[in-house]
Image (cartoon, grey):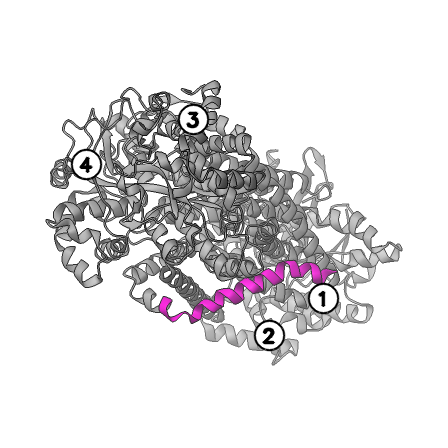
Amino acid sequence: MALPLMLLFVFPLIASFFFAARSIFDLAGWAALFIHPQLWSGLQLSLITGLVSASLSVLAALLIVSGLYQTKWWPRIPSQVGAMLAVPHLAMAIGLAFLIMPSGFIARGVAMFTGWQTPPNWISTHDPYGLALVASLVIKETPFLMWILVSILNREDVQRNFAGQRAAAVSLGHDMKSIWLRIFLPQILPKLIWPLLVVFTYAATVVDMALVIGPTQPPPFATIVWADINDADILYNARGAAGAVFLSLAVAGVAVLVWGLVKAFAMKREWLMTGPTARDIIRPSGPFSTSWRRAELLRGVHNFTLLHTSGEGGPKGRMRSLLARFLFSKVLLLYLLVTATLILLSFAILWPFPQLWPQTLSMAAWLRVWSNPSALITSLLVAGATTATAIAIIIAWLESQPQRRDKLILLLSASALGLPAILLTLGQYRAFLLLNLTGTATGLFLAHLIPVTAYMFIVLAAPYRSFDPRWRASASGLLCSVPKFLWTIKFPLLKAPLLAASAIGFAVSFGQYVPAQLIAAGRYSTLPMEAVTLTSGTNRPLTAAFALLLMAPPLLAFIAAAHFGKSRWSTA
Amino acid sequence: MIITRRALLKLTAFAPFIAGSAKAADWSVLTAEAKGQEVFFNAWAGADNINAYIAWAGEQVKTRYGVTLNHVKITDTAEVVKRVRDEVKVGKKDGSVDLVWINGENFHAMKTEKLLFGPFAETLPNFALVDTKGKPTTQHDFTEATEGLESPWGMAQFTFFGDGAKISAPPKSMIELAAFAKANPGRVTYPAPPDFHGTTFLKQVLIEVTPDRSVFAKPIDAAAFAELAKPCLAFLDEIRPVLWREGKQYPKSQSEVTQMVADGELLIGLTFNPNEPANLVAAGTLPKSTIAWQHAGGTIGNTHFVAIPSNAKAKAGAQVVANFLLSAEAQARKNDLKIWGDPTVLDVTKLSAEDAKLFTAAPAPGSVSIPGPAILEPHASFVALIESTWLSHFGNG
Amino acid sequence: MSLVLEKLSVYLGDSRIFEPLSLTVAQGEIVTVMGASGSGKTSLLSAVAGDLPEPLYAVGLVILQGRDLTRIPPESRRIGRLFQDDLLFPHLTVGENLLFGMARGPKIERQAMLKMALQHLELEGFENREPHTLSGGQRSRVALMRALLAKPDAMLLDEPFSKLDKTLRSTIREYTYSHLQERNIPTLLVTHDPEDVPTGGRVIYV
């Protein structure tokens, strides 16, 4: 049962790989690629923006998560991060662009004081270095990595182990910073490899965000490839295919290189065990202090507390949590600003510079959305169906297959996400064409199922596999049947990761643009497809309305997952 | 709404008589076959007014001919060319595209690769109304003979626009545009090719700086083009430092330029639809003080068409739709500034007085006041050379 | 030099977890704390160590080697701890675990101390082994040695023998006590098992 189900995911994926790999052999495409004037400059831009944004995202995510770990802010993180995850990349880019562009909100605010009548010559969006692109990627990817980190740290077994190890390390003289660096991180990082690879590949190969906010001459290489793949000219198609392969190789090469460097650093393990950080810093405070305390005590002032450090860990710990809260609140603020901007834009018909408020407001965009909800309905149906199918596939697999086989599916999932989407799409399109699946609902469904299953498997496999086997043992002791055990014990206990994975799957499906356009030949119009076609036009209110509409259902899914996923038994 | 429902019904009743073609019998067979068919019309969907117009056309063909029209929303027609080619290659007979909005190099590609059904266009009853004499581009798409493989839909002519409150004397030639850009540094630009507005801007420069324009009617090779392009590149280099972002970055599309004009970041926008500025004024996107103009020496004009892929499933239905799109009523509605503002391909003098009246409209803010002559598109072989030459000169900032 | 508790008690809001406790643990002395489950034995140890989890808080005074620990963060208190689990860090080797708490200093000295410790543990050659490849008894000894290498001024033992099997239990117990006494370390031991009480040692009930 599990195997044929899994084939729904595996077969189209392998077919896609196969056809993507075939484009390696088109020599004309390669020849054209290597004389493309923007090959090296565009590639350099892609790799650097990818690397910088991935590094900054992981740094920010670690700073925030480590600073807030087990403080009173900790329990609220999943729902807040979930809400941020729901904002589509495209919506973020559109909203952020309107904040920072020369005719955007910030410039209008400045103009109030400087009296500008025309927008300044700021190079804020489409800057040649890709800084705006990096910024929007970091804002989008930090919550994703935080989500992963929080879900690792909130696992029951990890919580238990880390609490003990932390107490042990404290008693050996290490403060929280040292414990994060030497105890927690080395154990978490191996689990972060795939998410990091996904983030890096995404950043280095993103098309839609790059078009909205990225550099244009040269543009990131992925946008060149995407344009080539969609061109009418066969030679350009071949060049695009070669470009997709080349970009994938470059991304993989850089990833391996960086991984090698990190590993080489980790191999020099001395930093792991340079002695304790705190032990010899603070000297005994001497008899004076004690006698002073004693005197105080004798005077009856006895009600003072001993410092307890759960979470904050002294003044340095408070600084860290302050920094973490500062960073986190700024990220949250940006999401709120972007959302507010999109809401305003969706009503603003005419809004000349330097006015702070639109000159003409209109409901037209929303009426238009309301009058034709078919794209929304299609997207909801597809997202619901693929998420449900994916969870069935994954649970069937995890329940029936030995854990060692997970590696294969994890590898496939990771390559489905870690390989540039453009390459995979190219192969998928060619495969589906031969299978006569283009332009069909089945094709659309299967094309959505691939990323949804891949994401959900990666998110779900680890918590599912680490489910304490003793539960099963004690349940068999109670003569409990397998389905009954699953429904009454295992699923409720794994509620949080199951719901979280479903929310992610739903959001991933909801945000897919390429399948509807390329695989379904536009015959089934989905919400992102409408949104992207609209961004090629001039109707900004409608684009903003669609961006908001893209955001709402995944947002609801994440909020629901965070709400219903709360454990009723947890006491920590 | 100008057209009342009653007027619509009357028009329908007259349509076959106006067409009055010898093939009336064949046509009735075709409409019978079309009944109940589902036509997937692949058309650029970046403008909501155009989408709304297509939706209207869908309602009409449904009630009149029982043909279901589905608008497949696309961002770039090149996607469709590729898709049809790929489908034909793998032998897919019931193709996913029945009708496509097309012109220029995309048509050229589909025609040379024999991906088009036809000839069908000139046997459509309503084709008799087309102004093939006054508007020769209705039969020559980028100098390529259409040979009935595509049916004309609307007219286009390269047009500039901006806010009349900020522009006292609009530049009426590329030389004047250069002077304007120098006087207003950072406020003028053009979209980067392969956006076809960007490519057309470059064609316009090329034509204006080339003394002998006969070269544009014939195919050209890379060596000849390199020679021809020299004055054009010199002109572009000259204006580059005063362009938006000092000519190091270019907007990716015409609509981005339009948005920046609306926001006040740029002073001059460009479009292929002379009525787009007026339409955007009517929609409220551009201010009422907007003006539009064409160069005194003329600007590039062309026609856009609809075509039927060779592997289309609903060929009869597609022809019925194409014919409806050529009807006086559909063309008049499309011509209406408040609806779309896309100029008609019809010869209004061939129409009945009543129909002709539909095409008269009071001048609206944002309209072109003194039209410049239409210049024919250079041969389709110029497009790829213009794009690659531009890219190697300006592609790296 | 000793570990002194003065009127130490732990609160949850207004309710007291255990009655104020005053106690002096002399150098090399092992004082056993006994009491029913939930009587606050572990809270007592946490209050001394300084890492009571919120919202618990402690009232009173802890004085170690003459210094008042009130405002000293737990990692700087020089108090070693052993737990029910050995809590060896799984991503570090046996040698690295032992070095983890050893004071900073020249590499050669630290390595020499590590070598001595391994000899003492009779685990020469185990330096690069992963903790999970060791037997339960070996791991307990490594955990003790790790704590001792950090040169604590006091030790807190939180039922460290409860998970060991019977035969191993007494050996490890003797091993632990002899080391603590040899080093003159004042020790608080929490346990359920009367057998754990060292001969002639004081027992406190909470």
Residue C111 appears anywhere in the view: yes
Q: Which residue corresponds to mark 4?
A: B373
| Residue B387, x across and y down, in percent | 26, 54
> Between marks 1 and 4, how big is the CA–CA gap?
76 Å
From the viewer's perspective, is B328 left or right of B235?
A: right
**Position of B290 relative to B208 (above/below):** above
> Between marks 3 and 2, how big is the CA–CA gap?
73 Å
Q: Which residue corresponds to mark 1?
A: A402
Indicate the secondary structure of the residue bearing disc 4: loop
From the viewer's perspective, is C85 left or right of A509?
A: right
**Chain identity of mark 2:** C
From the viewer's perspective, is C73 left or right of B182?
A: right
In the image shown, does C37 or A349 lie closer to the viewer?
Answer: A349
In the image shown, does A229 or B252 lie closer to the viewer?
Answer: A229
First along the sequence among labels 1 and 3: 3
Q: Amino acid at mark 4?
A: Pro
| Residue B347, x across and y down, in percent | 31, 32
On residue C117, which mark appears? 2
**Position of B321 relative to A498 (above/below):** above
Q: Amino acid at mark 3?
A: Phe
Total marks placed? 4
Q: Say whether marks 3 and 2 touch (CB < 8 Å).
A: no
**Chain identity of mark 1:** A
- Magenta region: A1-29
**Chain identity of mark 3:** A
In the image shown, does B393 or C167 lie closer to the viewer?
Answer: B393
Q: Residue furthest bottom?
A: C125
On residue A347, which mark appears? 3
Instruction: Give the foreground label among 4 and 2.
Output: 4
Q: Are marks 4 and 2 on the same chain?
A: no
Indicate the secondary structure of the residue bearing disc 1: loop
Within 10 angstroms of label 1, few (less than 14), some, or many (20 or more) residues? few
